[in-house]
Image (cartoon, rainbow, N blue to C red):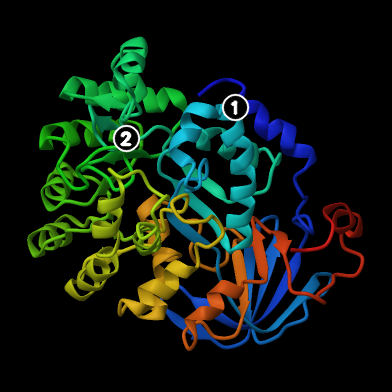
């Protein structure tokens, strides 16, 4: 990452809208509350928020002395959602492949600020960014209050093998390849157990929160194969063991069955995409407790764009058409087989802010709406290894979203989130809902609520 990338977040601080209301005590009067532990809707509840955390959850619509109330009757409140697979530093377009040569890191960082805000406003208060050198710096800017966005677990540079899905030199001509030389563990490219350990340690040095490996070839990389295995079991195990030394979990991009099998045997926490997942792999994942993050949205997006003549390079287009169309069916089979499923979209492939459509696609695949919502709340927290979010309970983070209607009866309401709170701060609220006397100057500075 070029050092000027850090400047993007700082420069945009002046442009970033403030939260509508700072983290003052609030009482959210919810028409219904989604209980992520049971997967059921509770009737009216009042969620009292103090100092960025849930202080208590009261039955009915309660007035709390000295605490401003937000009327969310007619709304279903839910724990803030987590998308376990995003790439906030980029967004797919017909120009994506040329932009890596034309733009600087600071350009991508500026774009990422807008993508982060869209993601938060869609109801996603946390994300796991699985690959992109911008994301650790964006995470820091958000944590410092310089820009608005979700809480980020950042992988930084993904780890690949030579010619693998995350080899940054794929597609370079011979002149450029000779000029920059072959990438190694510092750049996230490995070819041995020793390289694997070094690559993880470099991610630690770079400030990553999680490790991402590309266990198989990929759809959008500039290479012919979309599913070939690209690590040995020993290499995966070396990554997982070294990651564990630093408290990291490992996510594995994987489309082909053999690469998935090696990743699961090596001890990864989650399989991402999983297109050609076999019954054998599913049984192994259940045995090892490995999570599956389907990313159906990305599959559908690339399959649709593959129909266009000028969207993808010709080496990519057949893979996008063939692989992308299969992921939803794989998710359906995995759910029926009892594989543990958590929520992720691979946004950056599709447009940021559209994350909630994954819920619709999960339900289309036969996954119950309640299970899909759990996948983005309590199950996502389990994948991350945290216990302070994913539920609305006393002592947990006050990450709460609300939508008009009942998502268990009509899953499409998840695309109409009109209340977003993160760490007790309100970033979005329904039209007409005002809090007299509370942070009026903040709302004036922020402008009209989105």
Q: Residue at x 35, y 31 (%)?
A: 246
Res 176 → quadrant: top left
Element type at marker 2?
loop
Residue 230 rendering spot, x and y as whole percentages: 17, 37
Res 52 → quadrant: bottom right
Q: Nearer the viewer, residue 328 or 447?
A: 328
**Residue 143 visible, this orientation:** no
Element type at marker 1?
helix
Between the residue at mark 1 and the residue at mark 2, the CA separation in whole angstroms equals 20 Å
Q: Nearer the viewer, residue 427 or 41?
A: 427
Q: Residue at x 85, y 57 (%)?
A: 447
Mark 2 surroundings within 10 Å by alpha-carbon count, few (fewer than 14), some (14 through 19), many (20 or more): many
Q: Is residue 224 left or right of residue 158?
A: left
Residue 431 rendering spot, x and y as whole percentages: 78, 75
> Which label is found at residue 156?
none
Q: Which residue is mark 2?
A: 166
Q: Is residue 192 above or below residue 365?
A: above
**Residue 445 visible, this orientation:** yes
Residue 4 rendering spot, x and y as whole percentages: 62, 22
Mark 1 surroundings within 10 Å by alpha-carbon count, few (fewer than 14), some (14 through 19), many (20 or more): many
> Which label is found at residue 5?
1
């Amino acid at each position: 990452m070029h050092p000027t990338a850090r400047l993007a977040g700082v420069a945009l601080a002046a442009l970033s809208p403030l939260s509508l209301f700072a983290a003052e005590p609030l009482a959210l009067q919810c028409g219904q509350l989604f209980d992520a532990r049971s997967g059921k809707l509770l009737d009216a509840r009042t969620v009292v928020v103090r100092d960025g955390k849930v202080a208590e959850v009261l039955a009915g619509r309660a007035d709390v002395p000295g605490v401003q109330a937000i009327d969310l009757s007619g709304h279903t409140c839910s724990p803030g959602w987590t998308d376990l697979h995003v790439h906030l530093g980029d967004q797919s377009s017909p120009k994506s492949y040329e932009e890596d040569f034309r733009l600087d890191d600071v350009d991508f960082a500026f774009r990422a600020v807008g993508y982060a805000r869209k993601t938060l406003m869609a109801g996603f208060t946390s994300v796991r960014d699985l690959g992109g050198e911008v994301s650790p710096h964006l995470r820091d800017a958000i944590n410092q209050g310089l820009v608005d966005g979700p809480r980020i677990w950042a992988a930084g540079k993904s780890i690949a093998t030579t010619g693998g899905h995350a080899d940054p030199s794929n597609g370079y001509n011979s002149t450029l390849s000779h000029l920059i030389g072959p990438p190694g563990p510092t750049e996230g490219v490995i070819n041995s157990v020793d390289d694997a350990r070094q690559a993880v340690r470099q991610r630690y040095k770079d400030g990553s929160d999680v490790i991402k490996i590309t266990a198989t070839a990929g759809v959008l990389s500039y290479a012919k194969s979309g599913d070939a295995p690209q690590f040995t079991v020993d290499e995966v195990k070396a990554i997982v063991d070294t990651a564990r030394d630093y408290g990291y979990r490992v996510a594995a991009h994987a489309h082909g069955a053999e690469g998935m099998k090696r990743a699961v045997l090596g001890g990864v926490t989650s399989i991402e995409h999983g297109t050609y997942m076999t019954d054998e792999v599913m049984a192994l994942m259940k045995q090892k407790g490995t999570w599956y993050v389907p990313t159906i949205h990305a599959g559908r997006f690339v399959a649709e764009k593959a129909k266009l003549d000028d969207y993808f390079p010709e080496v990519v287009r057949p893979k996008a058409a063939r692989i992308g169309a299969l992921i939803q069916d794989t998710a359906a089979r995995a759910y029926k087989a009892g594989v543990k499923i958590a929520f992720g979209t691979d946004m950056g492939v599709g447009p940021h802010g559209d994350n909630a459509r994954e819920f619709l696609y999960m339900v289309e695949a036969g996954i119950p709406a309640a299970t899909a919502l759990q996948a983005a709340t309590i199950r996502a927290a389990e994948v991350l290894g945290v216990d302070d979010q994913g539920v609305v309970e006393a002592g947990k983070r006050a990450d709460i979203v609300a939508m008009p209607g009942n998502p268990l009866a009509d899953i499409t309401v998840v695309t109409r989130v009109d209340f977003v709170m993160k760490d007790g701060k309100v970033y979005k609220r329904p039209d007409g809902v005002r809090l007299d006397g509370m942070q009026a100057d903040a709302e004036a500075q922020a402008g009209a609520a989105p």
